């Protein structure tokens, strides 16, 4: 027992001696420089899980565990940006986390505020990293004083273009998707210039495009209703059709379209059929960032827990690690990155092989 | 903290903001950070927002750790060399690990084979505290017959049948099968016949579970002989061990199979958005009515419920377009380096699920 204490003390002494510190520092720099030589994920997301369990295991306070977690975050951000990752997204606080004890929530908020204020003091240094901070989430749920610190840090770094740090703070993915849907509906509910007088020409652009599309998709079940509405040749047919709904019977639709001819001052809307996955993606909080390449979750929990659902369900590599977040460092991240590079290379080889097969 | 490469002074400064018991000023903090900073940004991308502050000007590149404004050719060569060495070592390591895992899973497959008997499968899951009520799997459609021997529709159908039989044997009432291309949806009657035939070969004709096969936007397919859904005896969720539910005693066990494909993910959510915006354009929908609950209810009806457990049979976790909304709290299981559908993955996923703890943000 005493031997182990002695040992750990000795190890601590060695670890904190200047040459060892210098050596480790150099080794880290070398490894990071080496990693840069391969392909690097453009967008990495972290679920910082395990702070509380770490605190419990080590017999320290929960808040202290979160503090250590923040240190781990600082280390890993350094690794990410030095290797050339463009965007890092971290899951800092879930909307569900408000269910935790008030004491813990307040402590977390205070920590966020303190770190962001400190950060704001060093504007010049931040420019060196060229990283801008964005906060993704429900702003209404944050207290005003924290919000102030957030806004200051965000506006201070807004001009930096080299890298982005997305902090998901009161965030859940379902909430994000819902607001994206809402935003989309909002833009599509804005009339695009109401026509005060009906156009004299009997044709309208939306009609023609619809007819073209209809010819392309002969098998669409709405075919019948489309035909009937095109016969009525009214410029407001998009309105009527939408009011009638997709599955409604043809006769009611015709009636309505005849009625629609009577008053023609109704505003016209953009066609909802032009909504694509990209429209929604652009309305997500992560709009404008490269697609998510890698998602890392620590502490052995194999769940997404309402994080980045829209962003990670296609081609993202998801990695679940057993180590707790405060223990997470270059030494845990390195194998993940190398494996990702290895897989990336294999995928590229396969694709090349497929192309070669096709050309032969 | 031996591995971080920072001294004790820096650590305390970072944690408490003090050095030798005295709080740091802004300048001191910047001084301390200097050696760890990346090089100055190149002049081609000047920071647009701010003129350089005085503290930035007198900085010189003399620090020990900070030799480069431009990395020297030696350093670059060193990096390339180390990169080559590291990737070579890891490449060998990954290959060995894959071989080892392959051998281990083959041995396990021989030792714990289910012999196409439900009792064996029930024995494997007997001691679990809880079972998922809704299981989901991702399977792949292999175009070419490389090394698997399960290419094409035949192979896919075979995989699906086996999984369905295991699920029924374990006593799980709902199964959803995701396959990106949705090929199986074109063969609903065939799939139904194939699955019921497999179930018959597992359970025997007398206590074969009843089966209903469904896909979103398509009519549920069950042949006329199948008894209606209401007559089923889904094992109570309150009774933890499915083995106590001897299927012979009850009428019949029932299995719901749902076929999912990529279009049930983003595209369905898009369809919902389109419909909602049409309603918005007609003034039938108010902004505040669009909530996560509404979307959830719609998608639940149109596609599926949230599965409790998602099993991947691929070597890595890539979701391949699985419906995103439903994945919120789903436990995701995969066996590293596993390739192809096999019973070991299935059993280990169930075991893993029984151990997992659900916390919902707490």
Image (cartoon, coloured by chain):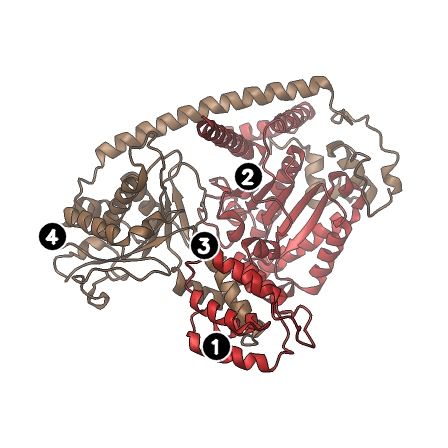
Chain colours: A red, B brown
Q: Is residue B81 above or below residue A82?
A: above
Q: Earlier in the sequence, mark 4 or mark 3?
A: 4
Circle 3 marks a residue in which chain? B
- Mark 4 on the same chain as mark 1: no
In the image, A205 versus B322, the foreground residue is A205
Tell which tag, 4 or 1, sits nearer the viewer.
1
In the image, B285 versus A303, the foreground residue is B285
3D distance between C-alphas at marks 1 and 2:
68 Å
Residue at the spot of label 4: B205
3D distance between C-alphas at marks 4 and 3:
37 Å
Circle 1 marks a residue in which chain? A
Q: Residue at x 74, y 33 (%)?
A: B38
In the image, A222 versus A141, the foreground residue is A222
- Label 3 SS: loop
Q: Earlier in the sequence, mark 1 or mark 2?
A: 1
Tell which tag, 3 or 2, sits nearer the viewer.
3
Circle on res. B265 = 3
- Label 2 SS: helix
Crowding around mark 4 (Cα neighbors within 10 Å: few <14, some 14 to 19, many 20+) is few
Residue at the spot of label 1: A254
In the image, A288 versus B64, the foreground residue is A288
Q: Furthest residue to the left? A: B206
Tell which tag, 2 or 4, sits nearer the viewer.
4
3D distance between C-alphas at marks 4 and 1:
55 Å
- Mark 3 on the same chain as mark 2: no
Left or right position of A23 against A95: right
């Amino acid at each position: 027992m005493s031997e182990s204490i002695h040992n750990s003390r000795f190890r601590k002494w060695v670890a904190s001696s200047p040459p060892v510190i210098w050596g480790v520092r150099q080794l880290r720099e070398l490894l990071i420089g080496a990693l840069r030589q391969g392909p690097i994920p453009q967008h990495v997301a972290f679920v910082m899980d395990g702070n509380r369990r770490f605190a419990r295991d080590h017999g320290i306070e929960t808040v202290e565990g979160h503090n250590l977690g923040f240190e781990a975050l600082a280390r890993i951000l350094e690794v990410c940006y030095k290797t050339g990752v463009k965007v890092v997204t971290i899951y800092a606080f879930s909307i569900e986390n408000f269910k935790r004890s008030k004491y813990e929530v307040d402590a977390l908020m205070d920590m966020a505020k303190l770190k962001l204020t400190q950060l704001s003091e060093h504007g010049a240094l931040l420019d060196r990293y060229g990283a801008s901070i964005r906060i993704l989430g429900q702003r209404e749920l944050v207290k005003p004083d924290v919000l102030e610190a957030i806004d200051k840090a965000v506006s201070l770094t807004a001009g930096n273009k080299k890298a982005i740090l997305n902090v998901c703070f009161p965030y859940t993915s379902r909430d994000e998707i819902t607001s994206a849907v809402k935003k989309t509906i909002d833009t599509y509910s804005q009339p695009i210039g109401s026509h005060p007088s009906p156009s004299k020409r009997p044709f309208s652009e939306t009609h023609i495009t619809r007819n073209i599309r209809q010819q392309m998709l002969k098998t669409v079940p709405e075919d019948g209703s489309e035909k009937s509405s095109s016969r009525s040749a009214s410029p407001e047919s998009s309105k009527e059709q939408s009011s009638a709904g997709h599955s409604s019977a043809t006769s009611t639709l015709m009636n309505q379209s005849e009625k629609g001819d009577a008053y023609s001052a109704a505003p016209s809307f953009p066609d909802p059929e032009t909504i694509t996955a990209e429209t929604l993606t652009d309305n997500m909080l992560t709009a404008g960032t490269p697609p998510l390449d890698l998602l890392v979750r620590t502490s052995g929990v194999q769940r997404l827990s309402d994080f980045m659902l829209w962003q990670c369900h296609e081609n993202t590599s998801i990695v679940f690690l057993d180590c707790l977040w405060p223990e997470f460092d270059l030494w845990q991240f390195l194998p993940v990155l190398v494996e990702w590079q290895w897989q990336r290379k294999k995928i590229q080889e396969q694709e090349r092989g497929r192309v070669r097969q096709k050309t032969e | 903290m031996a591995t971080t490469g920072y001294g004790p002074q820096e650590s305390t400064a970072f944690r408490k903001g003090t050095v030798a018991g005295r709080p740091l000023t802004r300048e001191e903090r910047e001084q301390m950070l200097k050696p760890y900073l990346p090089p100055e940004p190149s002049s081609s991308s000047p920071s647009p927002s701010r003129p350089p502050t005085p503290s930035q000007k007198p900085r010189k590149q003399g620090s020990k750790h900070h030799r480069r404004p431009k990395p020297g050719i030696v350093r670059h060569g060193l990096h390339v060399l180390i990169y080559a060495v590291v990737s070579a070592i890891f490449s060998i390591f990954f290959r060995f690990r894959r071989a080892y895992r392959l051998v281990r899973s083959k041995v396990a497959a021989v030792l714990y084979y289910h012999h196409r008997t439900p009792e064996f499968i029930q024995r494997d899951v007997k001691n679990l505290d809880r079972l998922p009520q809704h299981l989901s799997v991702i399977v792949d459609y292999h175009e070419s017959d490389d090394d698997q021997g399960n290419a094409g529709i035949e192979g896919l159908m075979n995989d699906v049948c086996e999984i369905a039989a295991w699920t029924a044997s374990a006593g799980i009432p709902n199964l959803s099968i995701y396959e990106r291309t949705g090929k199986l949806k074109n063969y609903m009657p065939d799939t139904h016949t194939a699955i019921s035939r497999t179930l018959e070969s597992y359970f025997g004709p007398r206590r074969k579970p009843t089966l209903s096969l469904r896909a979103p936007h398509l009519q549920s397919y069950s042949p006329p002989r199948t008894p209606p859904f209401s007559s089923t005896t889904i094992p109570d969720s309150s009774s933890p061990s499915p083995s106590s539910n001897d299927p012979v005693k009850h009428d019949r066990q029932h299995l719901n199979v749902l076929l999912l494909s990529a279009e049930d993910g983003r595209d369905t959510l898009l369809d919902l958005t389109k419909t909602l915006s049409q309603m918005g354009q007609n003034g039938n929908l108010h902004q505040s009515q669009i909530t996560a609950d509404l979307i959830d209810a719609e998608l639940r009806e149109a596609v599926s419920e949230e599965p409790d457990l998602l099993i991947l049979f691929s070597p890595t976790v890539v979701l391949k377009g699985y419906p995103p909304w439903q994945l919120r709290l789903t436990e995701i299981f995969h066996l590293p380096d596993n390739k192809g559908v096999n019973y070991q993955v299935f059993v280990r996923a169930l075991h893993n699920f029984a151990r997992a703890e659900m916390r919902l943000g707490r």
